[in-house]
Image (spheres, rainbow, N blue to C red):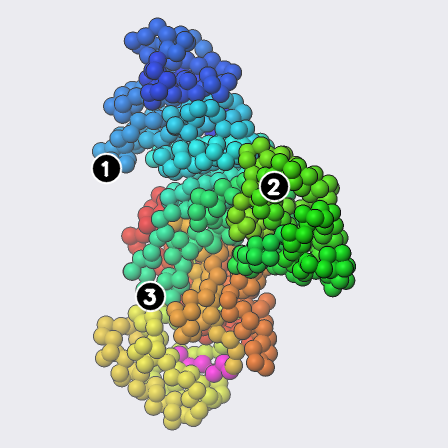
Amino acid sequence: MTQHSAASLGAFFAPRAIAVIGASDNPTRIGGRPVDFCKAAGFDGPIYPVNPTRDTVQGLKAWPDIEAIEGEVDLAVLAIPAARAEETLEACGRKGVKAAVIFSAGFSEVGEEGRAAQDRLLAIAARYGMRILGPNCLGCYSSASGACATFTTGLEGGMPRRGGIGLITQSGAYGTHLLSMAKARRLGVAGWVSTGNEADISVAECLEYMVEQPEITAIGMYMEGVNDAPRLIRALSRARDLRKPVTIIKVGASEVGAAAVQSHTASLAGSDASFQAVIEQYGAVRAMTTEEMFDTLYAASVAPMPKGKRLGILTVSGGAGVLMADAAELRGMQVPAMPEASVTKLLERNPFASPRNPVDITAHALNDFDLIPENLAEMMRTGGYDAYTGFFTSWTSSPVIGPKLRDVLLQTLKGAELPFAVIGLFNDEQATAYEDQGLLTFADPSRAVTALATMAQLAEGFDRGAEGTPPVIDDTDLTGTPTDEAGAKTRLAEAGIPILPERVVGTADEAAAAAQEMGLPVVLKIVSPDIAHKTEVGGVALNLGDAKAVRDEARRMLTDIPTLCPGARIMGILVSPMAGAGVELIVGTQRDPVMGPMVMVGLGGVLTEVLEDVALAHAPVSEAQALQMLARLRGAKLLDGYRGEQPVDRAAIASVIARLSVLAAANADTIDSIEINPLLARPEGAVALDALILPVAAQDVPQDGKDKT
């Protein structure tokens, strides 16, 4: 796929003239809908219906073919059978059309013959420098220009409200559902696009384009697969830099391939886990439900971002307060108590209250309405909260209490750049009155808290940004590195990763001599490029304290293991001093077939597969980012000293993670995985006790710059 500038997508969203090829006079037919929608949306450029059997289409002059049109055409919409697509696209190229939306189905989605036809369309477009959306897509819509190159039913009955939300979808029918939901929820939509078969334009490029549009302030995506991971990562990084919220629904979680059994890392870094890690790393959020995605888009388009995760809860119902406090804890929000002086002050004013946080003022506020602004003002003055919820049940919709409640809330919150979610019952007019002033409205307390928590997560990602730069390693080329432990550790040591002094020997007597020279006790390990898990074949002996024990264990390994592993190449025995106490970790990299090189860290040793407590990131990472990975581990407390143990050197671990990630990124096309298991973390420093480097299988090595996996 040719890498175009995303700016070329402007011809789809802001064309000066649109031709609809296969235009119908019937506005309900596929070929009639783009004409009807463009007129309804107020597209201010020429609309050229192309239909050789009619003089007019929907009141507009019809043209017999694209080349007969007298004016220039930026965007052509092909609402024609697949059999006519190639000749029509060729005519568009001769006309100088910049972009084409192809509704036609019957291409790569139907098999090899269709894929070949799709490739021919792509070749035609490339010859003329033309961009293609689709084929087999529903097209696109822009509220700013009124361009409606789509036949979606989501535009029936009127256009969405204009606003700052961009919607990108790989599914046509579900994309229509998303657009219809946005309209039903009164969300302001700036643009919408359905990418279809993605012969040319992918969701990643659409994201890259929308991120740069100043009128788009938040973006929602529905994805079924990743066709251009580097571009997606680049777009997410740019969105983070511009502090534009991106929320993604990603379906079709992948399972790890059964062939990747030699490396623990491979079984812990599957494609879906890698995708999730990239989302978190670049400051976007992943929604598990459509409702959650729209709640996030709604909150981001109405309210300011919170500056932290401290939630203040104001309520007239103790039960609702507890519900919101539970939801907050579940979603990682903090609900700190009010200062004691404030609690005492508020109790003196209202003895019926429970003003700690949640601050429950009870239904007594109906008798003394000033309690609402007084309690909220005290929370804002002394609580130090980053976001607020206020539960008022049906008071919000009351013709008597509702306007009064809105007035006191707006007056108390005036000048506060903090998100506030008002929870109650609303009709559209009542909700709009709050939203126009930057306040959120929800009927469900838990959804309100979840939306605020997601906003806090987005803000945290924006603030974190791209911390630091990856370390510089003079020689990153791992080509030809032996796949046995000794060769892998030697190469990692050259990249600045600490290892213990060790020696490879060929006989039992040499093992005993080496052990006495380096100092007992020692560990012996079989060295073989064909044995990944040495303990399973008796290839590891620990804490050998005298020469006889060393000699006996070495002799056993050299005798028994060739029998247990016939055909395995035995390179010798590795002799190394015992490392002592510390916390065992696994640090590894994996060439994910979709997302590219990933780096991971987790609890090591035998706990690796049992606990699956790992943190992933796209490689390369800086040492600061590696420290963030360590902080995400559920077992992170083990690193800080547990039951009297000394804290380990987190900076040393981070250095190893970062250096390994640089090697992975530099060898993404040739190295499948790098693994250190265990990495022993100690109060001073960390050391790699075992290592494995696996090359990419020959059939998977890219020959033309594209991943063959």
Q: Earlier in the sequence, mark 3 or mark 1?
A: 1
Q: How many C-alpha atoms fall within 10 Å of the one at disc 2: few (<14), some, or many (≥20)?
A: many
Q: Is residue 662 above or below residue 193?
A: below
Labels in figure, total: 3
Q: Disc 1 marks which amino acid?
A: Gly
Q: How many C-alpha atoms fall within 10 Å of the one at disc 1: few (<14), some, or many (≥20)?
A: few
Q: What residue lies at 58% left-to-right and 68% top-to-bottom? A: 650
**Disc on res. 262:** 3
**Disc on res. 111:** 1
Quadrant location of the N terminus in the rendered image: top left
Q: Is residue 501 left or right of residue 393?
A: left
Q: Nearer the viewer, mark 3 or mark 1?
A: 1
Q: What residue lies at 72% left-to-right and 52% top-to-bottom? A: 375
Q: Nearer the viewer, mark 2 or mark 3?
A: 2
**Disc on res. 396:** 2
Q: Is residue 441 left or right of residue 129?
A: right
Label 2 sits on a secondary structure element that is helix
Mark 1 and mark 2: Cα distance apart in space:
56 Å
Q: Is residue 576 magenta?
A: yes
Q: Is residue 555 magenta?
A: no
* Percent of width and height locating residue 689: 46, 75
| Bounds of the magenta segment | 574-580
Q: Earlier in the sequence, mark 1 or mark 2?
A: 1
